[in-house]
Image (spheres, rainbow, N blue to C red):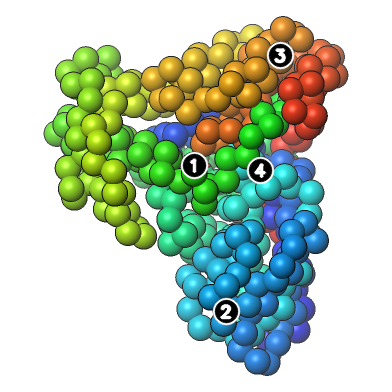
Amino acid sequence: MASATVTVSAPGRVNLIGEHTDYSLLPVLPIAIQRRITVHAQACDNGIVTAVSDTFAGSFRSDSEDNPAWSRYVHAAVKILGSRSGAHLHLEGDLPPTGGLSSSSALTVAVVRSLLELSDSRPSDDHLIDLAVRAERGAGVEGGAMDQTVIVRAQAGEALRIDFDPPAHRPVAVPPDVAFVVGYSGAPAQKGDEARDRYNARVVGCRTAAHLLGLDPPILGRFSGTAKDAVESLPDEAVPPEGLRLLSEGRFEDSSPLPVKAYARHVLTEAVRVDDVEAALRAGDIDAVGSLFDASHASLAGDFGVSTPGLDALVSAAREAGASGARLTGAGFGGWAVAVSPVDRSPGVLAAMATVAGEAFVAIPSEGVR
Ligand code: GLA
């Protein structure tokens, strides 16, 4: 018997380290956070999915071509599940929809799981992650699987080290004297909007770098030599071959040369920082975590070109207020930054980060979807 109503709540995430590494199948180390999106779903017998949100105006109908922008991921979730029975979804929550804290993946995971549960099929974690990743790619961003994986698998009090090739994950306890403070840059970076093409350019650029290194399939995570030698052998720029511009949904249209050497340098050095942050957290060495955050931000702002003046301002404000280190978190192009700080200095760091755009909070490592 299908259930008449279900409620599913999915958290946002803050990535601690491993930025723009997941789609090259290199590791990441995110936490799920206490800010969440909740979907209250009720079965309907008309075969149509409808949705309303407490946060946004307008409503979604699966049989309409004219839906509001916020419902893009509701549509993506309905589409990946194919034709199903009808449902009415009521969305609420306190996860900022500004980009950087993965509200799109939280929404997708929550809607996919609630629609499946309504029809009485509780998906395995692997299946839920796979459906949510494919749903989002269908919406045009060729993302990796970091966000969906941590949103589904996270446990309270722990970060999650995720490997993609081969797939594996392990908890990393967050020491009680460490605080992660996040602040908003003042500029939204929604995956679906302008950030989409800039994100996909990095995906295609990393594939091109891997291809030039002779990797088949063209994935930087398959590289097993010395990163420095590999990077030095690459040209500064290269035009992506036609076949590497194919995305799950359509094609990356821009065939301008991409800075493949700088992209590869970021990705290959960032992957090493994931190991190093994991080791530093296990050793309780906050200063080492902070230095690695700083190095990550420098690489994302320089080689990878995804920072903004607002993100740089947040990072500087946090460091000046006594954070051990700070970096942008998520895809960049706007959105949020994360600082690591001893707990006793975190109120000052929070106040300083809040001066940039008025929004900051201490991110608490929280449990995944429930
Ligand atoms: C977005 C994507 C993730 C990941 C990050 C950058 O959040 O959804 O898959 O690539 O950007 O690390």
- Mark 2 or mark 1: whose residue is earlier in sequence: 2
Q: Give the residue type at disc 1.
A: Ala
Q: Which residue is mark 1?
A: 195
Taking the view exactly as shown, the residue that stands out farthest to the front is 66
Residue 79: % across, % down: 49, 73
Residue at 17% over, 42% down: 241
Q: Mark yes or no: residue 139 visible.
A: yes
Q: Callout 1: 10 Å neighbours few (<14), some, many (20+)?
A: many
Compared with 148, 90 (above or below) is: below
Q: Give the residue type at disc 2.
A: Ser
Q: Give the residue type at disc 4.
A: Thr
* Left or right relative to 138: residue 161: right
Q: Which residue is mark 4?
A: 98
- Mark 1 or mark 4: whose residue is earlier in sequence: 4
Asked which secondary structure carries label 2, the reply is: loop
Q: Callout 4: 10 Å neighbours few (<14), some, many (20+)?
A: many
Q: Nearer the viewer, mark 4 or mark 2?
A: 2
Asked which secondary structure carries label 4, the reply is: loop
Q: Which residue is mark 3?
A: 317
- Mark 4 or mark 3: whose residue is earlier in sequence: 4
* Quadrant housing residue 125: bottom right
